[in-house]
Image: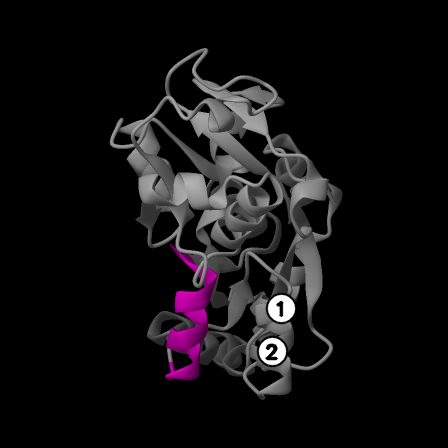
Amino acid sequence: MTSRNAVLLASLMVFGLPATSLADEVQVAVAANFTAPMKIIAADYEKATGNKAELSFGATGKFYAQIKNGAPFEVLLAADDETPARMEKEGLAVTGSRITYAIGALALWSAKPGFVDDKGAVLKKGDFAHIALAAPKLAPYGAAAIETMSRLGLLSTLEPKFVQGENIAQTYQFVSTGNAELGFVALSQVYAKGKLAGGSAWVVPANLHKPIRQDAVILTRGKDNPAASALLKFLKTRQAQNVIKSYGYTL
């Protein structure tokens, strides 16, 4: 409880009002690919519940290491389903709290219109100097990119051209600034309101990599915070799901 809430609680007790009138805060670690939709969802969550979600964005693998070392997060929205499951087994998360909040899509994207065709043939042509992807050991979208190139038989050919971002947000930045002509990003980063936001892209077929099932889980630090469980419930509402789908995720 914040110091502000402590003062409010004391006031409520004096006047005999229920403590449930108080709003709570929850510290949330969010996979970088989910940045745009989560900012909208957090604002809607606060309006609907009065609770505030404090958001931090980054790579799932890095969050795992931070949480294991005592970072004060209470909820994790991961970019995969393996990390939350592992955290449950290791006692870092509340058993049974895990939900799948979205299934992500991988896209090969260029900031240049017409550079990436809708079949991904540009990969075979190789008419570029750099291709960006997120570090596969830290970011599930990076792992999906490696798997895609492997299945296409292009990994060894393209590997010398790799520019790796620490997370998918940095990978997007490499491409958007032109430091890499194209790169594998989350579709949600380049897709909004049902259409491509700019540039050119190939949405990678789901059969070229394992499903990017994104799970959320309440962490041990959040087990007694009602705002943590309320947030996971809110992710399942139609209001939140409409936002999620508008960024190219499936449910």
Q: Mark 2 and 1 residues: CB-CB less than 8 Å, in contact? A: yes
Q: What range is drawn magenta here?
A: 55-70
| Residue bearing mark 2 | 86
Residue name at image x 67 percent, y 49 percent: 102
Q: Position of residue 241 (x, y in %)?
A: 69, 42
Residue name at image x 72 percent, y 42 percent: 207
Q: Secondary structure at mark 1?
A: helix
Q: Position of residue 143 (x, y in %)?
A: 52, 54
Q: Nearer the viewer, residue 11 or 241?
A: 241
Placement of 59 over or under 247, stated as above or below: below
Residue name at image x 50 percent, y 81 percent: 221
Residue name at image x 46 percent, y 73 percent: 64
Q: Nearer the viewer, residue 111 or 103?
A: 111
| Residue bearing mark 1 | 82
The reply to whether residue 197 is in sight is no
Q: CA distance from mark 2 to mark 1?
A: 6 Å
